[in-house]
Amino acid sequence: MSQRLRISATAQLARALEVGLVSEGSLKGSAEDRDVADQVAVLPRVDLRLSDRHRLRLVGAHRWRRYPDAPEQHARNAYGAVELRQRSADGSTWEGEARVERNAARGDRFDYRRITFATAYRAPLGQRSFLDIELKYRDQRYANRFVAVEDVDVPRHDFRWEPALGWRWSAWGNDLDVRYEPERRGSNDPDKHFVQHLVSVGISRRW
């Protein structure tokens, strides 16, 4: 069983400027890479309203991760991100994100730098349903983990494509979510290539 505590605070400094700070901790929680880890994080952010339909968010994070079963993966993880959100008159929204991340681990093999680009589009389909289209790309490079490419040791370089297609229907306080996520991971290490397909159906009710 996992436990998680999250505390957040925001302050409106001006009509178009808001700042916030999130602090959270988890025990045996799921980290971003789906590994089980204990984690403490501090995430400051700045929100700028560029216009009635455009928002810009600057986010930073510093995270301390501990892996009970793999102490060599203990790490300080930091990233900075820029997020842009646009809302159209028809109710559709578009979001884009660019993130730069550094993971400084106790074991050199787990040191890496990662760049992430993500985009998402949501469009209404009538009064009760929405269509979601998402795409995320991650480029991850290790400084001290090597693979043999044509008999030459080179630093390992991984990448990941994560598209998603979803449909949500809402009525009388109930939500039905149907989602399809094909994921493709690649690397200059030929043993690290794989493709997976995830189909999920969720039902929730708001009380």
Image (spheres, rainbow, N blue to C red):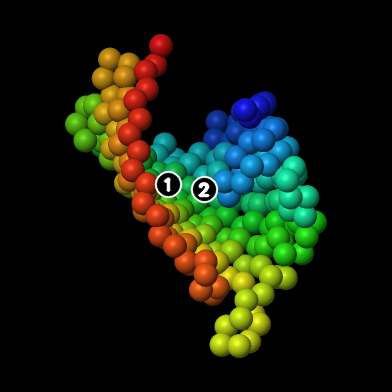
What quarter of the picture does the N terminus occupy? top right
Is residue 38 at least partly visible in the picture?
Answer: yes
- Residue ID at (73%, 46%): 69
Q: Please report the residue visible at 72 percent of the width from the left and 64 percent of the height from the top.
A: 109
How busy is the neighbourhood of tag 1: few (under 14 within 10 Å), some, or many (20 plus)? some
As drawn, which residue projects farthest toward the top?
207
Point out residue 12 in the picture as x, y percentages from the top left corner: 61, 28
Q: Position of residue 116 (x, y in %)?
A: 53, 57
Tell me the CA gap for discs 2 and 1: 7 Å
Q: Please give left or right for residue 150 compared with residue 161 in the image.
A: right
Mark 1 sits on what residue?
A: 95
Q: Residue type at mark 1?
A: Glu
Q: Is residue 72 above or below residue 56?
A: below
Instruction: Give x and y (percent) for residue 158.
Output: 55, 66
The residue drawn where x is 54% and y is 35% is: 16
- Which numbered dot is residue 145? none
Res 91 seen here? no
Which residue extends farthest left?
A: 126
Earlier in the chain: of badge 2 and badge 1, it is: 2
Q: Are marks 2 and 1 in contact (CB under 8 Å)?
A: yes
- In the image, residue 187 above or below residue 169: below
Q: Tell me if 47 is positioned left or right of 72 in this view.
A: left
Residue 114 picture quarter: bottom right
Q: Which residue is mark 2?
A: 83
Q: Is the residue marked by circle 2 packed among few (<14), some (14-19), or many (20+) residues within 10 Å?
A: some
